[in-house]
Image (tube, helix red, strand yellow):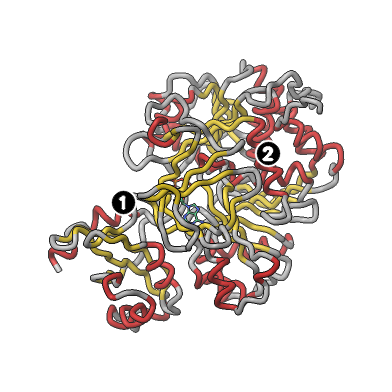
Amino acid sequence: MMNVPLTVGSMLERAEKFFPKKEVISRTLSGVHRFTYKEIGSRTRKLAAALERLGVGRGDKVGTVAWNHHRHLECYFAAPGMGAVLHTINIRLSAEHIAYIINHSEDKVLLIDEDLVPLIERVQDQLKTVSAYIIMTDSDVLPSTTLDPVFSYEKLISESDGKFEFIKDLDENEPAGMCYTSATTGNPKGVVYSHRGLVLHSFALGLADTAAISEYDVCMPVVPMFHANAWGLPFAATWFGSTQVLPGPQFTPKLLAELISSEKVTLTAGVPTIWLGLLNELENGSYDTSSLRAILCGGSAAPRGIIKAFETKFGIPFLHAYGMTETTPIATISRLKSYQNDLDDEDMLDVRSKQGLLVPGLEMKVIGANGEVAWDGSEMGELLLRGPWIADEYYMDERSSDAFRDGWLYTGDVATVDEEGVVKLVDRTKDLIKSGGEWISSVDLENALMAHEGIFEASVIAVPHSQWQERPLACVVLKPAFQGKVSKDDLLEFLAPQFAKWWLPDDIVFMEEIPKTSVGKFLKRALREQLKDHLVNN
Ligand code: ADP
């Protein structure tokens, strides 16, 4: 067979050639804009030419500080298309970590959204390698800024002719992108994506048994483009010629609901907290969501209650998927097998709320205390992954040897595997609750709590205990209509029939809001810190 390199630039070329009329709908600070792939292609080539004029060459890192919108999409293809490396910077990291990752990756140029300029101004004195700042604004006038030298994105691209040719003599194993993932302690760790990895991952997203992304889709990634490449959706959707809806800065559940109905979105993707918000909006407003064929949900466990609510109340199918920054990210996805379609509703929900089957192309092992676990749905072990879109190291980081060993990625996630090969994540190794020498899954307790009609959010953590080592403590946020109407005893009574007695939380703390990580997951570290003496004092 021909040894033709798999490259990111060729994905956009396909959209330009075969889907020039299809659209990218992009929301920015000034409103909603529509561009065809023909226009996106031409603008991307102009951007690549402009970056070249600014001195960006092969292998150089191009950092983006941006929401989900058309200019960010153009960066997704311009940098890899010219042989440079797209570094999507997580804007929700601390200033210290933002400065660290820009220096560590040695970004040469930064492309920054107008409203995010202050983030970079705050750290500019610490930046060692950035030689140009490009501001992505709709306005003809640049905002006043201390960044220097500073350029206007639109002005830069207006000075090019759109004829830039994507680099052809590229080795598919060369880096195309990178993204840093937060570490439990210390600085974020960098993951570098090769052209080959990104293209093969896009193939995987198109398979009928995974996300089945196709030209027929209208894809709206809510998961940020600064986090694990918005789960690879922008690459796959462009390649397949799907319509894309990019919801832009500071979106709300209302805005998402409006976009779904006005743009007839068929597939959207994000973390469970986004869907909790949307569910609340749909329950209280009136929106046409009939176009949605699936909500792709991952990043943390999709609570069974949300899956059920979306499917039974609104007829919107939920696709639960699992992955991590290190896995580009899709690793497993939950779908029923053909012969499981006659299960009763609750059994189907059991299967669908698990993290699912390994996607084709990857290999897995689950290693417990005595080697590989039995596929019995109960023996737990750490999930190990390998495959062409799994990272094999952290970028210039001595912590690599902790996670990458013997050709496998040690995910730090604890899982069981059932007789069908379906993976269920029990917890992260660091979040499991060890009570009297036995493990309690915080995830199972959270899912059960979130199935209660009065609960908006729930997070269960381990707190130190003199006798049992650790005990579970539940933190819950009630829905406004249930404030003051649901007590701790009500919730314990609700949980009791579902768990062994020793699994039940020792206490339930009612909160206004659960602290979240940079990508909207529950920040258990903060909860543990805040509540570490809770049981002692109680
Ligand atoms: P961060 O560590 O910053 O959250 P990632 O987004 O890479 O970065 O997180 C990956 C982790 O998220 C996984 O290791 C796993 O613990 C968790 N995760 C991802 N998807 C799921 C899921 N569907 N169910 C449960 N946990 C998930």
Q: Which of the numbered marks, if any, corresponds to residue 371?
A: none
The secondary structure type at the circle numbered 1 is: helix
User: 243 and 187: which one is in front?
Assistant: 187
What residue is shown at x 65% (from left), y 50% (from top)? Answer: 246
Count every numbered label the image shows and give the total.
2
Q: Looking at the image, is 157 positioned above or below residue 379?
A: above
Q: In what quadrant of the picture does the N terminus appear?
A: top right
Is residue 37 found left or right of 315 in the rendered image? right
What residue is shown at x 65% (from left), y 36% (from top)? Answer: 198
Q: Looking at the image, is 386 positioned above or below residue 59?
A: below
Q: Position of residue 79 (x, y in %)?
A: 65, 28
Label 2 sits on residue: 200
- N-terminal of the pair, mark 2 or mark 1, is 2
Q: Where is residue 528 in the image (x, y as percent from the top left)?
A: 27, 55
Observer able to see residue 146? no
Q: Position of residue 316 (x, y in %)?
A: 65, 70
Q: Position of residue 317 (x, y in %)?
A: 64, 68
User: 492 and 372: which one is in front?
Assistant: 372
